[in-house]
Amino acid sequence: MLLHRLILAALAFSTSFASAQHLVVSPDARYLQRADGTPFIWIGDTAWELFHRLDREEAAHYLQRRAAQGFTVIQAVALAENDGLRVPNAYGEVPLVDLDPARPNERYFAHVDWIVNEAARLGLTLGLLPTWGDKLYSKHPGAGPIVFNPQNARAFGTYLGSRYRGNPIVWILGGDRGIDSPEVLETWRAMARGLREGDGGAHLITFHPRGATSSADQLHNEPWLDFNMYQSGHAHRYIRVHAYAERLALLRPRKPFLDAEPAYEDIPVAFWEFVDWKNPQRVPAGVLDERGLVVDRTHFAKGFFTDHDVRVHAYWNFLSGACGYTYGNNAVWQMYQAGRDIAIPCVQEWREAIESPGAAQMRHVRALLEAHSLALLVPDQSLVHGPNPEGPDHVRAAGSRDDSFLLAYLPRGRSVDLAPGTMAGDSVRARWFDPRTGAHLPASAVAAGDIRRFTPPDSGEGRGWVLVLDRPVAR
């Protein structure tokens, strides 16, 4: 009865956002769009601990900065990873009374409400995870505890679906876990049914899988899975994110797909090789300073991911057909600040980290894609002539359905030979787009028959460029 009353209260709460413009899958199932048909460019951020660790002033600052930086989606977790059922939020509240999903704590969810509403006010969509995956059985357990089963998962889904029925939300099940037993699959199915019942089908549902896997591996044919997510992860530099995209594009029924967790800016490469999970500080004495920040970077022998890695994976993903890309920063996902428990050692506190170069450069990704519609973009590696090996110099290219543009991304600025076809005519404008600044520079080519060689303004590690061929619109 208590949960029933809470659901009724949630339905009343949701009416204030009844006119919110929700996302839908495009008719050709290649991208997401607004209800009016406008393509939606998913530029996400992993703010997994947003509800759990930040107070309202902090959350408002974070959301305002991300909106100003051009982000469109914030991925956050209601029942958070870092012992989110037992460690209270900034106001001393835990989400469940006595760890019971049938007894959500109204005071905790009032704080979630405030953040969800503030995100909506700023034009942001919430990629909302009802729970992190460690609250279900997993072969890779976390802080947990395990509290969900098929019976209570459906009721909890109904509660959340009702509460946020009118908000700009995408539901994300999973939470860094696979489907490790038949009961786990039934539990996620039940939660999806509850969400649908609660929100009346107003919101899309997807699934955030474990690293180096895709939701399609186990769930592609689930009727509730509206689009696929993959987690390309943090194992090494120049991850072949395009391989996920190429495989998912071949699946039927066709569903949009995106990289929901690529390599985070400022996270150690293959961090698990250098972390002692039994040590609260995670690393030996001397690696961290008095604020708990990394001062001895040599401990992480493979280095740290940078803004260059963020750009590489963003452009490789989009030009391979992904409908979105989620940025991440090691300090931001865990909202780390001095004095808090450390999940993975950071080089900055979260307030500094939200201003990192890679985050600032996400607006340039968005600007390029808004100028060259996802509805028209078609990945086409046949445009690249000659050798195109995997690795740091791998070129990704895409044309357009109406032959109005061609895009090619060169991670380290090497010369590229293209067979641009009709995009080589006199009416075509050639420019270099700088992913670091968003600036355009004129481009020229050396022709050899039907092949054009384009050489960027400079080259080297961190000096990638996007070649843009387009037909200027007459005004």
Image: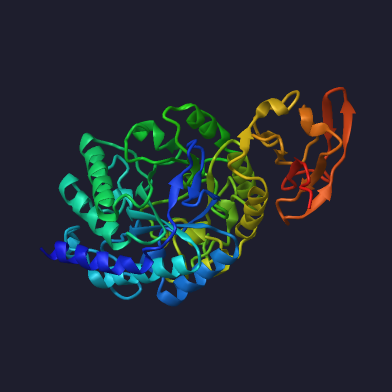
Could you say which is closer to the camera, residue 67 or residue 372? 372
Residue that extends furthest to the left in the rendered view of this protein: 1
- Give how far across and how far down residue 40 sits, in percent: 53, 50
Confirm whether residue 230 shows in the render: yes
Residue 309 rendering spot, x and y as whole percentages: 62, 47
- Taking the spot 72% from the left edge, 28% from the top edge, the residue there is 383
Question: Where the N terminus falls, by quadrant?
Answer: bottom left
**Quadrant hosting residue 236:** top right
Residue 360, percent from left and from top: 63, 60
| Left-right relation of 92 to 464 | left
Residue at the image point whose x is 27% and y is 43% from the top: 188
Q: Residue furthest front?
A: 475
- Between 244 and 123, the residue placed more toward the observer is 123
Give the x, y percent position of residue 345. Answer: 49, 58
Q: Residue at x 83, y 23 (%)?
A: 450
Question: How is the structure coloured here?
Answer: rainbow
Horizontal side, residue 357 vs residue 225: left or right: right
